[in-house]
Amino acid sequence: MSPKIRYYNLLAWECLSSIRDFLGASHDDFFSAIDATKAISIEQITIAYHRAKRILEHSEKIKRTESAFLMLMTGEKQISRAQEEGGISSSTTSILAVYVNEKDILDFENLCNGKLKANPEIPLPEKALDMDGVVFTRMAKVELSI
C-alpha cells in the first residue's frame, strides 16, 4: 500500500510548535510532514516510504519509520541533519503531508486553525527528471549506512 500525499500552503507559521509536537507523537500507522520544496517527485516520496518500512523491519538503529523516511528523502545519514534539511522550519511556506490513516490527516489539518490551506495540485520542480539520479543515489547511500 502506498501512502497518500497532501500539499498545503502554510499561511502563518505561528503553529510551528504544534506541528512539531504532532510530528513527534505516535500515530496509528505512518505520518510525516516535510518542507514541500525539498521533494523532487511523487516517486521519490513513494519509494522513500516503502524503503523506510523495509528498513524498520531489518534495522536495530532506527526506531521510527518517519525517521528513516526523512533520512531517505533528504539523503542524510543522520536523523538530526535530515530534520534540518527537509523538516518543517520557520522558513517553510509549503508542506507535504505523507500519511496512511485519514484520522491523522484530519487531526493535522485541525492543528493550525485555518493557517494551513490545502491545495489539490502538488507543484514539483520542472527539472525533476534531471534530479532523479542524484536523489536515488543519495537514498541508496543512506540505506547502506543504516
Image: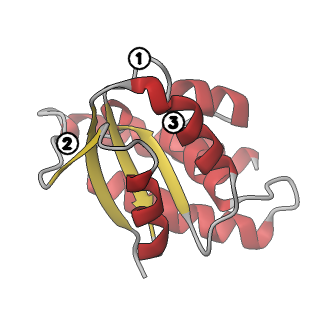
For label 3, the crowd category at 10 Å Cα-Cα, with few meaning under 14, some 14 to 19 and many 20 or more, is many
Q: Is residue 55 visible?
A: yes
- Point out residue 126 in the picture as x, y percentages from the top left corner: 11, 33
Amino acid beneath label 2: Leu
In the picture, measured across the screen, residue 14 lies left or right of residue 146, that is left
**Label 3 secondary element:** helix
CA separation in Å, label 1 and label 3: 17 Å
Look at label 3 and name its amino acid. Answer: Thr
Residue in the picture at 45% in, 41% down: 34
Residue bearing mark 3: 74
* Residue for badge 1: 91
**Image point (62%, 55%), residue name:** 66
Seen in the picture, residue 135 relative to 4 is either above or below; the reply is above
- What residue is drawn where x is 35% and y is 40%? 95
- Which residue is label 2 attached to? 129
| Residue contact at pointers 2 and 1, CB within 8 angstroms | no
Badge 1 amino acid? Ser
Q: Earlier in the sequence, mark 2 or mark 3?
A: 3
Residue 58, located in which quarter of the rendered image? bottom right
Indicate which disc, 1 or 3, sits on the residue closer to the N terminus: 3
Structural distance between the alpha carbons of marks 2 and 3: 17 Å
* Farthest front residue in view: 113
Q: Residue at x 66, y 26 (%)?
A: 81
When the figure is inspected, residue 42 is found, relative to residue 73, above or below; the finding is below
